[in-house]
C-alpha cells in the first residue's frame, strides 16, 4: 500500500479560474457545503485573471454615434430609445464566428443568460468601467456586429476573478491552493475522485467525491509562440483522455492576431476594439484587402491568416520580417491611458516600445483552445457521440467543449462561456448531490500508480542525455511550424511523426531534483508528458479533417466542406495504437440558422 491519505468531499473541483470558482460558488449557494477546489496555482494566478478585453453580453448600453461608421466613436443609448442589440444578434454572430460548427442549442443558452450573469457580477461588486450615467461601459470586439464587450479597462479578467474568488470564500468553499491533480478516477463509467499532490510537501492524496468537475483551462503552452500563462499545459484534457474520456474538436486552436513580436504575450483585441490599425512594412492597412467591411475588427482566424499572408509575401516587419505593426498612435495618450494601460505597460516592458508614440510589432500567437472535454449544457461530460453521460464527471471553461465556439471563438465569448457554464455546472452538481448521489468505492490504489509514475521520472538513469526541457522545446517548435495558422497534410504528418518520436524519448528524460518539497522539476516533467499526450490528438484530428473551417486552415484543402465535414471530431484513446477518431453531429436549427458562406 502507498503512504497516501484519503480526503473526501461531496464535490471536488479541479481549477480555480472563472469556471472552477463559479461552479463552487453556485453549488454552495444551491446548498451543498462540502466542496473542495484544487488549484496548482494560487487561485488568483489562474489565467482567467490575465484576460484583458471584456466579457460579452447584449446589454444595450452604447451605440455607434449615428453616421460615424463601423469604427467611429460610441455614445450611451439614452434611456427609452430603441435597443440596437439582442440575444438573437449575439447568437447569430457567434454561430457565424464558429463557422457553423458551434452547437446552436448551447449557444442560445449562453447568449440568453449572458445579461443576467453580468448583472450577478455587478451585484457582487465587480468594478466594471462605467458610462457617465453609471451603466456598464461597452466596447467593440471582432466579429460582433454591435459593441457588446463589457469591460474594466484592460483588466477585465482580473476584476472578474477577484470578485468570484472572494464570493466563493464567503460561501465557505475550501480551497487547496498549490495542489496538483495527477489523475482522474473513473470506473465503470462512474467518476469517483482524483489523485492529487500537495505541492508544498510532495505528498499524494486520494480525493474521493460524489461529483468531480474539471475547470483546468487551456493548453496554448504546446506552441512556441503563445499568449498563455506557463501553467496552461492542458493537464485536465490529457488526464481525462488517459482516463478514457474522449476529446472533441481538438484541431481547432485559435491564433490571436496580436501577440507581441517574438514573445507571444497578448496585446488585447481591445486595441483594435478601441480603433487600432494593423499595418504592413509598406505602412498599408492591409485588412482592406481581406475584410473591407470589418477591417481590423474581423474575427481572429481571418485577421491572423491575413497577417500571415502579408508576412509570407514579404511585407513583414521585425528582425526576421515575421511580424506586422499594431498602430495605436492616433488613439491619443488619454484614451490609451484610460482604456489600455496594461497593454502600454506590456509593450514597454517586453519590447521597449511606447505605444503612444510608436507602432509595436506583433504576430499571431496560440491563444485559445476551442476543443476539449465534451460536455452538455449542464457541464455533464459525455462518453460518446450519443451523449451518454460519464456519471459524476463535469467540465466547464476552456478545458471543456460544450461547443459554443465551434471552429473559431469570438473575443469576449470565453469569459462568458467559462463563467456561465461554470455556474450551470455548479448548479447541476448540487442537484445531482441533492438527488442522492452516492460515494462510490475505488478499487486498487490509484495514488500508488502516481507514486510509481513520479518515481520512474526520478529514477531515469543519470547517464541519460535526454532532458525534459529539450523535448518540450522540440514539441513547441513543431507545433508552431507544422500545426499553426496555415496547415497542410505533409507538414502535419511530419509533426505526428515527431510527436511519436518525442513520446518515445520521454521515458529517458531526466529529472534533476530528487526531493519531494515543491519539486517543480517533477511537475514540469509531468506537464510536458501532458503536452505530448494531447498534442498528438490535436495533430491527428487536424490531419484527418480535410477541409478549412474557422481556425483550422489547410492550404491543401482550402474550402469549407459541409457535405463531408459539418460534424465534430471525437477522439478516443486507443491503447498503444494512438488516437481512434470518431464523429458527433452538430446541433443546428436548420430553419433559423442554416449554414451560410462566412463573409465579413
Ligand atoms: C492573455 C489572455 C487574455 C484573454 N482575454 C480574454 C478576454 O478579454 N475575453 C475573453 O472572453 N477571454 C479572454 N481570454 C480567454 C479566457 O481568459 C480563458 O479562456 C478563460 O479565462 C479560461 O477560464 P478557465 O476557468 O477555464 O481556466 P483558467 O482561468 O485558466 O484556470 C485554470 C485553473 O486550473 C488549474 N489547474 C490546471 N491544471 C491543474 C492541475 N493539474 N491540478 C490542479 N489545478 C490545475 C489552474 O491552477 C487554474 O486555477 C484570454 C486569455 C488569455 C490567455
Image (spheres, rainbow, N blue to C red):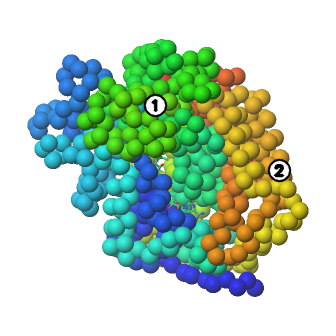
Q: Is residue 566 left or right of residue 16?
A: right
Q: Which residue is mark 2?
A: 577
Q: Is mark 2 within 8 Å of ligand 1?
A: no
> Of helix, strand and loop, which one carries label 1?
strand
Front-most of 17 and 329?
329
Question: Could you tell me residue 14's position as x and y percent?
Answer: 53, 65
Which numbered mark, 2 or 1, is in the foreground of this view? Answer: 1
Question: Could you tell me residue 374's position as x and y percent?
Answer: 57, 51
Mark 2: few, some, or many residues within 10 Å (few <14, many ≥20)? few
Question: Could you tell me residue 515's position as x and y percent?
Answer: 71, 75
Indicate which disc residue 360 carries: 1
| Image quadrant assignment for residue 336 | top left
Seen at 60% across and 40% down, the residue is: 225
Q: Is residue 166 above or below residue 599?
A: below
Front-most of 434 and 145?
145
Front-most of 402 and 277?
277
Q: Check if mark 2's residue and mark 1's residue have beta carbons within 8 Å.
A: no
Seen at 56% across and 27% down, the residue is: 318
Q: Is residue 27 left or right of residue 483?
A: left
Seen at 34% across and 73% down, the residue is: 171
Question: Could you tell me residue 375's position as x and y percent?
Answer: 54, 53
Amino acid at each position: 500500500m502507498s503512504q497516501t491519505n484519503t480526503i473526501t468531499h461531496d464535490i471536488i473541483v479541479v481549477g480555480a479560474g472563472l469556471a472552477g470558482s463559479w461552479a463552487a460558488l453556485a453549488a454552495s449557494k444551491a446548498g451543498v457545503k462540502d466542496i473542495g477546489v484544487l488549484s496548482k496555482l494560487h487561485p488568483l494566478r489562474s489565467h482567467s485573471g490575465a484576460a484583458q478585453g471584456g466579457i460579452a453580453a447584449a446589454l444595450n448600453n452604447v451605440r455607434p454615434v449615428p453616421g460615424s461608421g463601423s469604427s467611429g466613436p460610441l455614445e450611451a443609448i439614452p434611456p427609452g430609445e430603441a435597443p440596437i442589440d439582442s440575444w438573437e444578434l449575439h447568437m447569430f454572430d457567434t454561430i457565424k464566428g464558429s463557422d457553423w460548427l458551434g452547437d446552436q442549442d448551447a449557444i442560445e443558452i449562453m447568449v440568453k443568460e449572458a445579461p443576467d450573469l453580468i448583472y450577478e457580477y455587478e451585484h457582487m461588486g465587480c468594478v466594471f468601467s462605467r458610462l457617465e450615467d453609471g451603466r456598464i461601459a461597452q466596447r467593440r470586439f471582432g466579429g460582433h456586429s454591435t459593441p457588446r464587450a463589457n469591460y474594466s479597462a484592460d483588466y477585465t479578467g482580473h476584476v472578474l476573478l477577484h470578485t468570484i474568488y472572494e464570493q466563493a470564500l464567503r460561501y465557505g468553499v475550501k480551497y487547496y491552493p498549490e495542489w496538483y491533480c495527477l489523475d482522474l478516477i473513473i470506473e465503470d463509467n462512474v467518476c469517483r475522485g482524483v489523485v492529487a499532490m500537495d505541492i508544498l510537501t510532495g505528498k499524494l492524496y486520494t480525493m474521493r467525491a460524489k461529483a468531480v468537475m474539471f475547470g483546468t483551462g487551456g493548453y496554448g503552452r504546446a506552441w512556441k509562440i503563445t499568449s498563455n500563462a506557463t501553467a496552461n499545459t492542458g493537464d485536465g484534457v490529457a488526464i481525462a483522455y488517459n482516463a478514457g474520456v474522449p476529446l472533441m474538436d481538438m484541431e481547432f486552436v485559435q491564433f490571436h492576431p496580436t501577440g507581441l513580436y517574438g514573445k507571444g504575450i497578448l496585446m488585447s483585441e481591445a486595441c483594435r476594439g478601441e480603433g487600432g490599425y494593423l499595418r504592413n512594412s509598406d505602412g498599408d492597412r492591409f485588412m482592406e484587402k481581406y475584410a473591407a467591411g470589418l477591417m481590423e475588427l474581423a474575427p481572429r482566424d481571418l485577421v491572423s491568416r491575413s497577417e500571415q499572408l502579408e508576412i509570407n509575401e514579404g511585407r513583414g516587419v521585425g528582425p526576421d520580417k515575421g511580424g506586422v505593426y499594431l498602430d495605436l498612435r492616433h488613439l491619443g495618450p488619454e484614451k490609451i491611458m484610460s482604456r489600455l494601460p496594461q497593454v502600454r505597460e506590456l509593450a514597454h516592458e517586453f519590447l521597449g516600445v511606447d505605444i503612444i508614440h510608436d507602432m509595436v510589432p506583433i504576430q499571431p500567437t496560440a491563444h485559445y483552445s476551442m476543443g476539449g472535454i465534451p460536455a452538455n449544457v449542464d457541464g455533464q461530460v459525455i462518453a460518446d457521440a450519443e451523449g451518454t453521460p460519464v456519471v459524476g464527471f463535469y467540465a466547464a471553461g476552456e478545458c471543456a467543449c460544450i461547443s459554443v465556439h465551434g471552429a473559431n471563438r469570438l473575443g469576449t465569448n470565453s469569459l462568458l462561456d467559462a463563467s456561465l457554464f461554470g455556474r450551470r455546472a455548479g448548479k447541476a452538481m448540487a442537484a445531482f448531490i441533492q438527488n442522492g448521489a452516492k460515494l462510490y468505492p475505488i478499487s486498487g490504489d490509484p495514488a500508488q500508480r502516481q507514486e510509481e509514475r513520479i518515481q520512474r521520472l526520478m529514477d531515469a538513469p543519470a547517464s541519460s542525455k535526454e532532458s525534459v526541457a529539450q523535448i518540450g522545446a522540440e514539441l513547441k517548435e513543431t507545433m508552431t511550424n507544422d500545426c499553426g495558422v496555415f496547415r497542410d497534410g505533409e507538414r502535419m504528418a511530419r509533426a505526428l511523426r515527431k510527436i511519436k518520436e518525442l513520446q518515445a524519448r520521454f521515458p529517458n528524460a531526466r529529472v534533476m531534483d530528487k526531493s519531494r518539497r515543491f519539486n517543480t522539476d517533477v511537475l514540469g516533467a509531468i506537464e510536458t508528458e501532458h503536452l505530448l499526450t494531447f498534442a498528438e490528438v490535436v495533430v491527428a484530428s487536424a490531419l484527418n479533417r480535410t477541409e478549412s473551417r474557422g481556425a483550422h486552415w489547410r492550404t491543401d484543402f482550402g474550402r469549407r466542406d459541409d457535405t463531408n465535414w459539418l460534424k465534430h471530431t471525437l477522439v478516443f484513446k486507443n491503447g498503444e495504437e494512438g488516437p481512434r477518431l470518431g464523429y458527433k453531429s452538430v446541433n443546428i436549427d436548420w430553419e433559423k440558422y442554416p449554414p451560410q458562406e462566412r463573409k465579413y
